[in-house]
Image: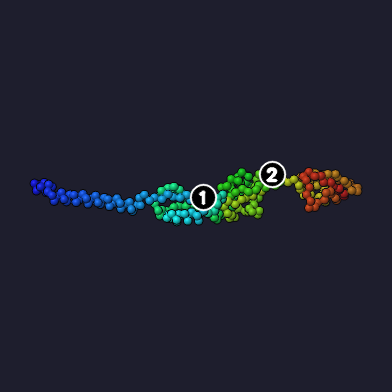
Amino acid sequence: MNKFFQYLSSAVFRKNLIAAIITVILFLVLIFFGLRVYTRHGENIKVPLLKGKSIEEAIKTVERMGFRYQVDSVYQADAKPGMVIEQDPDAGTDVKENRNLYLTIVTRVAPSVTFPDLLEMTYVEARSTLSNYGLKLGDTIYIPDIARDRVLDVKYGGQKIKAGEEIPKGSQIDLVLGNGFGASEVEIPKLIGFTLQEAKFALQGASLMLGSVNYMGTVTDSATARIVSQSPVPDSTKVSIGTPINVALSN
């Protein structure tokens, strides 16, 4: 035990202790500066603002600054194709060189959607359905029909489109709707050969009125007399609802 304490007080121990302390200090200094070099302490680079730029311009910028990048795409009907709309990390963030930047751009090609069945829907239902499918409402065309604000026909690019067809997302769809009033003009029915009672029934079904009734020659029984002429006559021209039709009867 005395020898141990004698060793601690000897010049050899002091020399070895000093050497050990110097070695530890040098090791710590080496680690400190080594880590600074390895991590490039103080050499952070600020992420540039890439949102709003074209993908071509953004790629040139990140490559010039020593970054890597990954690109994802989404579709937005109201955004310019090829434009960067999101970036990660955000602009101004301090990062190391060779960091991966994640860019989201607007795709140049719209994805397709399956066109829904809109016939017989109300205007409000059709508009909501179009929005859910990523489609836009174009023109609304009203035609005479008793079904007010009901979808009677659907058009895309001026042509009729059926449910189940594939069209680009964001397309404009025109709706043909009923105005709730029905047809304002109707065709004239052919009454020749009808009895007066049959003519009245036919005119009522066509929303027309019976005008003047004339008899040609001697008519012994008006119930069995047949129509031999009418005015206006049936042709390709339509007349307004409620127009009176004049007839002449004969046995």
Asked whether the viewer can see residue 140, the reply is yes
Observer-nearest of 213 and 235 = 235
Badge 1 or badge 2: first in the primary sequence: 1
Residue contact between numbered discs 1 and 2, judged by CB atoms under 8 Å: no
30 relative to 12 in the view: left or right: right
Can residue 204 be seen from the camera position used here? no
Q: Nearer the viewer, mark 1 or mark 2?
A: 1
- Residue found at x 43% / y 54%: 65
Q: How many marks?
A: 2
Q: Percent x, y for residue 233? A: 82, 50
- Left or right of 35 in this view: 247: right
Circle 1: residue type: Gly
Residue at the far left in the pictured view: 2
Q: Which residue is mark 1?
A: 52
Neighbourhood count class around disc 1 (C-alpha, 10 Å): few under 14, some 14–19, many 20 upward: some
Question: Relative to residue 237, is residue 37 drawn left or right?
Answer: left
Q: Report the residue marked by disc 2.
A: 179
Graded by Cα atoms within 10 Å as few (under 14), some (14 to 19) or many (20 or more), the crowding at tag 2 reads some
Q: Quadrant of residue 167?
A: bottom right
Q: Secondary structure at mark 1?
A: loop
Which image quadrant is residue 212 in? top right
**Apparent side of residue 239 relative to residue 72 in the rendered image (left or right):** right
Residue in front for this viewpoint, 218 or 25: 25
Q: Name the residue located 64 percent from the left edge and 54 percent from the top edge.
A: 157
Which element is circle 2 on? Answer: loop
User: Disc 2 residue type?
Assistant: Asn
Residue occupying image coordinates x 84% and y 46%: 246
Q: Position of residue 226 (x, y in %)?
A: 84, 49
Residue 35 percent coordinates (x, y): 31, 52
